[in-house]
Image (tube, rainbow, N blue to C red):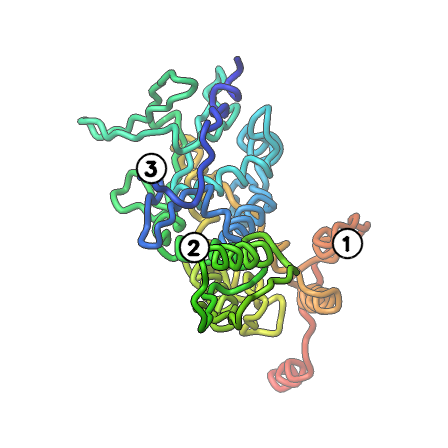
Amino acid sequence: MNIFKRLFNRKTEQRALGWRDPDGWQSLIGGTTAAGVTVTAETAMGHPAVLGAVRMIAELTASLPMITYKRTTGGKVRAKGHPVYELLHTRPNPQQTPFNFKETVCLHLLLHGNAYIVIQWDDNGNPAALWPIHPSRVSVELQSDGTLLYKITTQGQRKDYTADDVLHISMLSLDGLTGKSPVQLARESIAAALAGEEHAASYFANSARPSGILKTNSVLSEQAAKRLKESWQAAYGRGKSHGTAVLEDGTTFESISGNAQEAQLLESRQFAMRAIAAALRIPGHMLDPTVRGAYANVETQSLEFLTFSLQPLLTRLEEAFTLKLFTTEERKTLFVEFLTESLLRTDTRTRYSCYNTAITSGFMTPNEARIRENMEPLAGGDVLYPPQKGANDEKESGKRN
């Protein structure tokens, strides 16, 4: 069996895991909460706000190219000849695309607080493949000599790895060894949101009919009471709709539960979305359509999301890959960085105006602008124009002469 199957295969749980946990089952993240709901990575994703936030961060991060650069006296250039460049940009392992690989790593971080990647080395000591491991299979131990030992269990067999062979990325670490996920730390809010979804589903499963009592001034016989209950349940019981109940002897219905508006189902859902957005650092207007963004400009909103939501995660990944995939000597000139320009693309008119300003001021060549627009370079387009002198500059020059 190849390394992919050994690292990725997981036995499917024989028992389906629900939100409730009457048997007291505890998961790796969360366990029971005050709302009586068990919050795990899987159950948390059952809430649309958690699912939307996690997907947004993981998929956007996975869509950004991860480039290996080499520092130069004039800035930086792509280190296309280095093995790490091909590994991160084209093929992290024989089974995954770069997008799938980065998405898996981000999901492990967001939902479990830790991402573990086994590094497969070639005969020359260069990384040849990167294999993400599910966090539930890994335990970390601090040895007496200060080194870390990673115990990875696959198919009932345990294998120990040193820190040199495992690329470990953690979030919100309190002990410097392992991290905690935002989902784990915000499990009470997520549990309340899941309980609200469960209540809403139960409410609408009963055709949005409130609970109540049947009242009558008469004394009903046992048979009449049974007949009345059966008639009501047949018309308005769980899963029933559009039925007609026959009430006898002046019987009336009195609701003892509020309607949807009184129960504030919509308000509670919106509040849950905002709480989850805050926990996962997503601008509220990106999850809840009823919340208006603070800015009308799309570019400004994208910059806000990149700066406060994505950039800390990107930096965490960049530094971890740079630290583990390069030698001490290589790190003096080589590093890993995400390309984020695609998140900041503006409308066509604004981009072209910016290009014109950059070219005429001597900041950018015409071909550099064309490359950004995925266009072929033109002959003579690599000339950097000198900055244009303004009228005031010419006057000052004349005075000095």
**In-front residue for pair 93/83:** 93
Q: Is residue 144 left or right of residue 76?
A: left
Q: Is residue 128 above or below residue 317?
A: above
Residue at (59% x, 40% y) in the render: 78
Determine which residue is flagged by label 2: 195
Q: Disc 3, disc 2: CB below 8 Å?
A: no
Residue at (73% x, 67% y) in the render: 356
Q: Secondary structure at mark 1?
A: loop
How many marks the image carries: the answer is 3
Where residue 56 sits in the image (x, y, percent)? 56, 52
Where residue 213 sits in the image (x, y, percent)? 45, 66
Q: Disc 1, disc 2: CB below 8 Å?
A: no
Give the quadrant of residue 87. top right
* Furthest residue toward right: 379
Residue at (58% x, 49% y) in the render: 60
* Furthest residue toward left: 144
How many C-alpha atoms fall within 10 Å of the one at disc 3: few (<14), some, or many (≥20)? Answer: few
Residue at (61% x, 66% y) in the render: 299
Q: Amino acid at mark 2?
A: Ala
**In-front residue for pair 315/103:** 103
Q: Is residue 348 left or right of residue 337?
A: right
Q: Is residue 370 left or right of residue 72?
A: right
Q: Is residue 387 above or below residue 63?
A: below
Question: First in sequence: mark 1 or mark 3?
Answer: 3
Q: Amino acid at mark 1?
A: Gly
Q: How far separated are the C-alphas under marks 1 and 3?
A: 66 Å
Determine which residue is flagged by label 1: 381
**In-front residue for pair 200/194:** 200
Determine which residue is flagged by label 3: 25
Q: Secondary structure at mark 2?
A: helix
